[in-house]
Amino acid sequence: MNKHDPKGIPHTTPRQSATFTQDINSDIRRAAATGIYDIRGGGAKRKVPSFDDLLFMGASISRYPLEGYREKCETSVTIGGLHAENPIELDIPITIAGMSFGALSGPAKEALGRGASAAGTSTTTGDGGMTPEERGHSDKLVYQYLPSRYGMNPDDLRKADAIEIVVGQGAKPGGGGMLLGQKISDRVAEMRNLPKGIDQRSACRHPDWTGPDDLEIKILELREITGWKVPIYVKVAGARPYYDTTLAIKAGADAVVLDGMQGGTAATQDVFIEHVGQPTLAIVRPAVQALQDLGMHRKVQLILSGGIRSGADVAKAMALGADAVAIGTAALIALGDNDPKWEAEYNELGTTAGAYDDWHEGQDPAGITTQDPELMKRFDPIEGGRRLRNYLKVMTLEAQTIARACGKNHLHNLEPEDLVALTMEAAAMAKVPLAGTDWYPGKPNTSY
Amino acid sequence: MQTIDLQDIGLREMNKTLHAQADTTNQTAWEIVNPKGAHAIACGLDAPIEVTVKGSTGYYCAGMNQQATVNIHGSAGPGTGENIMSGKIIIEGDASQYLGATGHGGLIVVKGNASSRCGISMKGVNIVVQGSVGHMSAFMGQSGNLVVCGDAGDALGDSCYEARFFVRGTVKSLGADCEKKEMRAEHIEILKGLLDEAGIDADPSEFTRYGSARNLYNFDVDNAGAY
């Protein structure tokens, strides 16, 4: 009995709304208090159909496995052999995605270069241009050509091993960026040719071309300026993967980078991250279909990104037809981002390890997504590079383990027929059978 | 004077020949005939040479130019002089959209008119247009100077940063956070220098200066309607 229940009538238990959850209510309270939408870093946090919903079947009587550690399972990949004089040769099909100097500290960019180089793969610049540290520590560096053109100059363009024209990214298809004033140090301001301390907007579309016909001419110009030597990638968000891939190929891309909604960003509106774009699982098959329809599969490479975390994810991406993957958020975690050892400081920022996503505020306790000189000192680029190399090696070994179990002597030989899906959604998106059946939704010549 | 017939040798060979010119080259004068509106003519130059294109050009002529002077004896297509770093581009006719987009330095002179988005995202380039410019010119302009001897279209200098705009005629409308500014002696000096360099005879005192009101530099919810 309590004061509201003087007659002892039984009460229902307090019930939280499935619509107005505590998370949602906190969003409403924050919006009401501030009058501005929530900006954060990272990718979609909502649960979406993912590679976790797929399983490899492994070997059986009809497929025999390769001996682990004894029989070779190749992992190399060549990117950009179609038009470029000097394609990129990678030892492993896991690349480091574009992240800007500005969003990340100089030492963090250096560590990405060190780790990628030690693992035999490439890393990528970002909005803000190429730094000498990054170039110096990266054996293979992909130069992002972005709408803002911050720090863009032909000398750096010619120093790049490949050029990636960024049309969009998975976290915010159709959106630009914003680097808040607190991260605009003297060096960042100088590289971007803007006053120190102001909010820097990155445009959402290129200033000097619109549409696929223009893109073809832009690619021609970049090839002319770099003497047709280096591959040109086109990066698109996972928005309309079949058509975007088709148009990128027709415009003359050597490789297509396709980024699903779990892919991270340095900063954008939470509503954008969570409600625009498609899950990585949903975009790979349409893109591969586009490549196959044009007879370009394995000629124009497909690099898939957005929530890739393990060798299993790598193997699944490749089984569905990707040539390589790119990692961003996972690489930052390998460097030490969101490490529980900084829990007390995450708590001071009103968050907890694993959930910290206010990268744009520049207060990263791990010293990675910051330009604060004191915080940056916490991060050792040599140790960070070693950790990233280890992580890349582990992912590669994991993917090889799975490939050998499926009887494949190269990761590229993995195929959709090696997979089953755990859910109807995943079966439909990946076009592989629901486990225990020979059917997936939308399979040709089947009835529902 | 070295003459290249573009129709004879093709774009790749032409650009390769121009790219091969070093800082110390004695062959400083080049003429390109039969351009026929081709794209990416003389882009990525990086030597103190003077290239004259005898006719109209397509997209991205003299894109990312360094050191060189490129004369276009005709009209110029979209994105001419995009991301120019240094040197000079002189267009005898009209220029299409995105002229000098994101240009970091150097000078672009247009004897005719320039279309929309002239000087978009300019980052230090100077652009002098003898005629008029179209809408959204100098959108997000960061630094450098845009001189318009005629009129400017809608939304001049929208969301600009520290770039300066000098317009002699009318401005159809100003973009977000762009405002009329006082023309001080130092600005008259800058403008006079640019007009002289461009070889345009105009009285600097007839121009009005525009630039950023700097109200949108840091987000403020009370300005939300302007975003």
Image (cartoon, coloured by chain):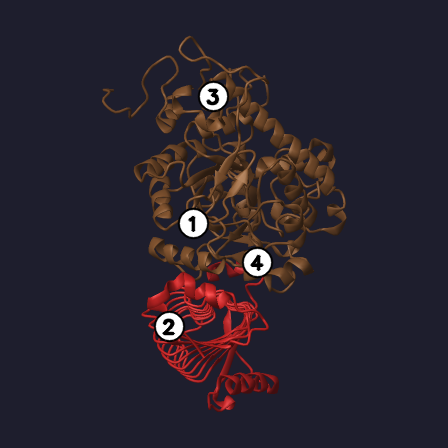
Q: Which chain is brown?
A: A
Q: Which residue is mark 2?
A: B76
Between circles 4 and 3, the one closer to the viewer is: 3
Provide the secondary structure element on which disc 3 rests.
Answer: loop
Q: Quadrant of residue A131?
A: bottom right
Task: Say if A229 sits above or below B198 in the image.
Answer: above
Count of marks, rendered view: 4
Chain of the residue under label 1? A
Chain of the residue under label 2? B
Q: Nearer the viewer, residue A427 or B59?
A: B59
- Residue found at x 63% / y 50%: A135
Q: Are marks 1 and 4 on the same chain?
A: yes
Q: Which residue is mark 1?
A: A174
Quadrant where the image shows the N terminus of chain B: bottom left
Spatial CA span between label 3 and label 2 = 55 Å
Residue count near mark 4 (Cα–Cα under 10 Å), binned few <14, some 14–19, many ≥20: many
Residue A102 numbered tag: none
Q: Are marks 2 and 4 in contact (CB under 8 Å)?
A: no
Q: Which residue is mark 4?
A: A200
Residue count near mark 1 (Cα–Cα under 10 Å), binned few <14, some 14–19, many ≥20: some
